[in-house]
Image (cartoon, rainbow, N blue to C red):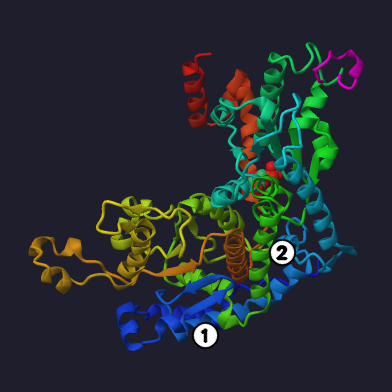
């Protein structure tokens, strides 16, 4: 495959020096801010519209220097360039990793295996944009001749989390009269609840699946197809007895009715890399949008997987989203290491995880619109970097991907921040906020001009990182007249690391920038660890076992007898209590 063997990062001189630094490391954010009047400026970087303040991290120039050396000794730059060139850096699947090609400038040329992939990307986008424009203009009509106004995206993992996260984030940009919903879970509750108040006559279903074999998605797509067809049949829109097989025989249909096939072609589109399987499923290939196996599922929101988003916000806004991503790609590819934000943030994560003992990383957006962003990042980061072998198969003897989690502020403050402030574990946290609100609301009862709610909100954003960094000493607690016996409980240790990211407002471009930033942070960490951040073999075993257990669940005693005693007892419990 021509790929150089990965470096074991622990064998580099930089790793050894970082180990030594960590051993004697005494973080002192209070002291550092006092002795370095320019600390905020010195540790703040810009990328696109993002103002990234790293100053409240447990970082010194010494540590940074070693971390940058580590990146060099682990060939992070070379690996980044190999990715951007389209080399097969996804070694275990022998694939290129080219999500960045999805947002290259339209006239760029990127030849991979003799094909200009940018041209292919733009051709597909053109098809998606034409389709989206038609739906948005009310010209894509359903079986009964009505415009389609609710888009249901059926997909899971990368074929769900990207679209739903971005749709939620960009709600202010969604065209009036258009709504998107998302069905992902094979729990029948999801399809049931999502469709229960929907009108099939005005519903468009997008089945999104890279492989078009994912059990959840194919099952949900079939269930939604039944829901749609029976709804249309009940209303006499599909001819009585009309089936997919008899479809096309237009002469047999009565006036005002359509065949099943026709109904499906008006209400279903598909997004996949496996267009043959789309056709097998019964979706007209003319209604299918493709992408390529060099786009990983969790890196696919900017491919055809984002079709629901394009319909919701329109091609122009989607282009802005792509441009935002491109801005960060260019920065990652060209900025000097000491100014390269994804590189610095990835290295900080390595510093915390491998040298200072952090196991998790919180992402805390102070924006309700970003409420699905942590869930999206969980797949991006943990499916990418939750690996125990390097890409040459050698077992790692150091920790890899940390656990990402989070919730929007201020909700999290009243739930789990206690642990971040006073718990025994270090939780490096990214705080994200925007200078401008979408909803300019005031609390009119508070004082003469009322209180600006966004300012109340942001005061929390500013205060939290301050409290985490600088804490509150026993002396300060005592000075407030606190009874001695509860002084210890009220001390805040400080030195809890945070990164603050701000932007003017949450636009499509800024969302694109944030996504690309985290994609590249994830890349940097994987490159340091020498792992393949682009495969996901760890999700396979459970899928295979679930399939194998189905006969035991539905009554095959021999299969039931062959399973372990715990699983057997659980299935027996299910069989005893399931009512119908
Ligand atoms: O099982 C994990 C996974 O393969 C993810 O990587 C992917 O995003 C998801 O399933 C859905 O896959 P598909 O788009 O092929 O249905």
Q: Which residue is mark 1?
A: 65
Q: Quadrant of residue 385?
A: bottom right
Which marked residue is nearer to the observer: mark 2 or mark 1?
A: 2
What residue lies at 44% left-to-right and 69% top-to-bottom? 500
Q: Position of residue 524 (x, y in %)?
A: 60, 69
Tell me the element at label 1. Answer: helix
Q: For the residue with label 2, is its CB less than 8 Å from the closest atom of ligand 1?
A: no
Chain-order first, disc 2 or disc 1? 1
Among the 4 quarters of the image, the one containing residue 440: bottom left
Q: Is residue 404 visible?
A: yes
- Position of residue 223 measured from the top left corner of the image (x, y, whole percent): 66, 26
Q: Is residue 203 magenta?
A: no
Please give the name of the residue rendered at 62% of the width and 21% of the height, measured from the top-left corner: 558
Span of residues in magenta: 247-258
Under tag 2, what secondary structure?
Answer: helix
Residue corresponding to mark 2: 100
* Number of numbered discs: 2
From where the camera sits, is residue 10 visible?
Answer: no
Q: Is residue 424 above or below residue 304?
A: below
Answer yes or no: disc 1 within 8 Å of ligand 1: no
């Amino acid at each position: 495959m021509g790929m150089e063997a990965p470096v074991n990062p622990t064998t580099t001189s930089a790793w050894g020096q970082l180990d030594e630094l960590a051993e004697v490391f005494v973080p002192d954010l209070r002291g550092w801010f006092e002795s370095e009047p320019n600390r905020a400026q010195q540790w703040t970087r810009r990328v696109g519209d993002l103002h990234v303040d790293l100053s409240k991290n447990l970082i010194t120039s010494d540590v940074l220097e070693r971390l940058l050396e580590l990146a060099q000794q682990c060939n992070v730059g070379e690996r980044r360039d190999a990715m951007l060139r389209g080399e097969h850096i996804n070694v275990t699947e022998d694939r290129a990793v080219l999500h960045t090609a999805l947002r290259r400038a339209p006239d760029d040329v990127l030849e991979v295996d003799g094909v200009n992939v940018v041209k292919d990307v733009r051709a597909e986008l053109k098809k998606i944009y034409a389709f989206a424009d038609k739906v948005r203009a009310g010209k894509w009509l359903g079986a009964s001749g009505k415009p389609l106004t609710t888009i249901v995206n059926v997909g899971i993992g990368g074929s769900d989390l990207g679209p739903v996260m971005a749709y939620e984030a960009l709600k202010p940009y969604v065209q009036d009269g258009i709504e998107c919903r998302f069905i992902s879970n094979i729990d029948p509750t999801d399809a049931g609840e999502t469709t229960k108040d929907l009108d099939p006559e005005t519903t468009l279903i997008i089945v999104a699946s890279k492989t078009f074999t994912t059990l959840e998605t194919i099952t949900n797509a079939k269930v939604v197809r039944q829901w749609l067809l029976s709804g249309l049949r009940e209303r006499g829109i599909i001819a009585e007895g009309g089936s997919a097989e008899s479809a096309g025989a237009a002469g047999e249909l009565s006036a005002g009715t359509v065949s099943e096939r026709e109904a499906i072609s008006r209400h279903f589109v598909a997004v996949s890399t496996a267009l043959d399987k789309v056709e097998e499923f019964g979706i007209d290939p003319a209604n299918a949008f493709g992408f390529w196996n060099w786009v990983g599922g969790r890196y696919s929101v900017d491919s055809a997987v984002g079709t629901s988003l394009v319909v919701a916000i329109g091609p122009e806004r989607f282009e802005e989203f792509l441009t935002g991503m491109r801005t960060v790609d260019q920065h990652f590819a060209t900025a000097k290491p000491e100014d390269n934000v994804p590189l610095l943030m990835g290295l900080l994560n390595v510093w915390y995880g491998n040298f200072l003992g952090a196991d998790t990383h919180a992402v805390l957006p102070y924006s309700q619109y970003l409420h699905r962003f942590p869930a999206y990042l969980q797949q991006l980061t943990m499916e990418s970097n939750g690996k125990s072998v390097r890409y040459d198969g050698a077992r790692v003897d150091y920790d890899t991907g940390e656990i990402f989690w989070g919730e929007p502020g201020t909700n999290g403050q009243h739930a789990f921040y206690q642990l971040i402030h006073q718990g025994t574990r270090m939780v490096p946290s990214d705080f994200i906020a925007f200078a401008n609100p979408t909803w300019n609301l005031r609390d009119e009862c508070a004082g003469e001009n009322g209180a600006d709610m966004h300012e109340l909100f942001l005061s929390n954003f500013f205060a939290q990182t301050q409290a985490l960094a600088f804490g509150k000493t026993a002396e300060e607690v005592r000075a407030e007249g606190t009874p001695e016996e509860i002084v210890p409980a009220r001390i805040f240790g400080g030195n809890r690391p945070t990164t603050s990211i701000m932007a003017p407002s949450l636009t499509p471009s800024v969302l694109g920038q944030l996504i690309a930033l985290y994609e590249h942070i994830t890349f940097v960490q994987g490159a340091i660890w020498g792992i393949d951040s682009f495969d996901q073999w760890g999700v396979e075993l459970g899928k295979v076992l679930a399939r194998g257990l189905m006969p035991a669940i539905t009554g095959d005693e021999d299969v039931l007898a062959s399973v372990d005693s715990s699983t057997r007892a659980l299935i027996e419990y299910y069989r005893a209590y399931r009512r119908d």
